Image: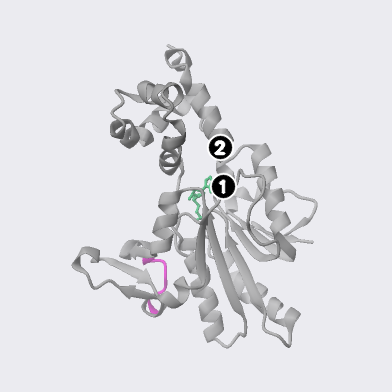
Amino acid sequence: MNQMLRCPHDQRFSDLIRSRTGIQLPVHRRQMIESRLRPRISAVGASGFDNYLSRLFDDGLLEEELPLVIDLLTTNKTDFYRESVHFDVLVREIVPEAIRRTAPHAPRLKIWSAASSEGAEAYTTAIVLAEAQRAGQRFSYAILGTDISRRMLERAQRAIYSTEQLAPVPSELRARYTMKARAPTHAGTARIVPELRDRVQFMHLNLMDQTYSVDRDVDVIFLRNVLIYFGAEDQAAVVSRMVSHLRPGGYLMVGHSESMVVSHPHLTQHSPSIFRKT
Ligand SMILES: C[S@@+](CC[C@H](N)C(=O)[O-])C[C@H]1O[C@@H](n2cnc3c(N)ncnc32)[C@H](O)[C@@H]1O
């Protein structure tokens, strides 16, 4: 039987998630949606997915549940040094160029990880920039990480990662920029050192919002592996808002599978998945 007929709320739920988060979850992916939401279905004591949806829409549970629903429906996969060419370009081109541009003064780079998940992208940036400073480059930097998932933001702020998560970080840098936990309860984990944590701030931000409370002279925006979840209209709107937060000459980095969706009159392509504001 047609699943939409079985539950009148399926389409409404799918539309709601799209309008609130940009994430496209067509009703034919009901099984996946249902399995991700199982913890909430149990938590509110609903008899099943249909009953959970009617609790949201008919019993006024929606606004209370929504943040938790979003936490469960977002795909948060991330890695340290993911798509590492972006970090190479940052250190080999963007930093030296900024130093030349502001000479004799040292520049202060503003970096935004705009779908930061649990922070690996922001802390990888901090590690490579700290290394550039150690190598004698004169600059300072501030990193902002934002995400729609409050659960991921809490993890990012904690900055505690498992040995497996930290495996892509070269061992010498792991020794320099992470500290092993002493408590037995945290065995097998390490925390990013305070000197790097101090450079990174995390904040809740929904890319679907019409305006973002972020500076408009950002040097580099990482907007990686998030546009793929949005429809074409939302992708274009988000890219356009990102452009308005870059300083002229600033860079937008997207995931390698997302290059094709980036098109804006003020962006020129620097290389696959890297764009520059004119
Ligand atoms: C697959 S992760 C990508 C993480 C990181 N950028 C990377 O490439 O490794 C996608 C992230 O986008 C976030 N996200 C999805 N929709 C969002 C929205 N509307 N606003 C802000 N973040 C969103 C998710 O919560 C998730 O943490």
What percent of the width, then of the height, locates residue 39?
31, 36
What percent of the width, then of the height, locates residue 259?
65, 51
- Indicate whether 163 appears above or below 42: below
The residue that mark 1 highlights is 206
The question of residue 125 being in magenta is answered with no
Amino acid tagged 2: Arg
Tell me where residue 97 sits by quadrant: bottom right
Q: Residue at x 43, y 17 (%)?
A: 7
The numbered dot on residue 20 is 2
What percent of the width, then of the height, locates residue 46?
31, 26
Q: Which residues are magenta?
A: 166-172
Q: Residue at x 28, y 28 (%)?
A: 45
- Disc 1 C-beta below 8 A from ligand 1: yes
In the image, is 158 to the left or to the right of 234? left
Circle 1: element type: loop
- Indicate whether 50 appears above or below 215: above
Amino acid tagged 1: Asn
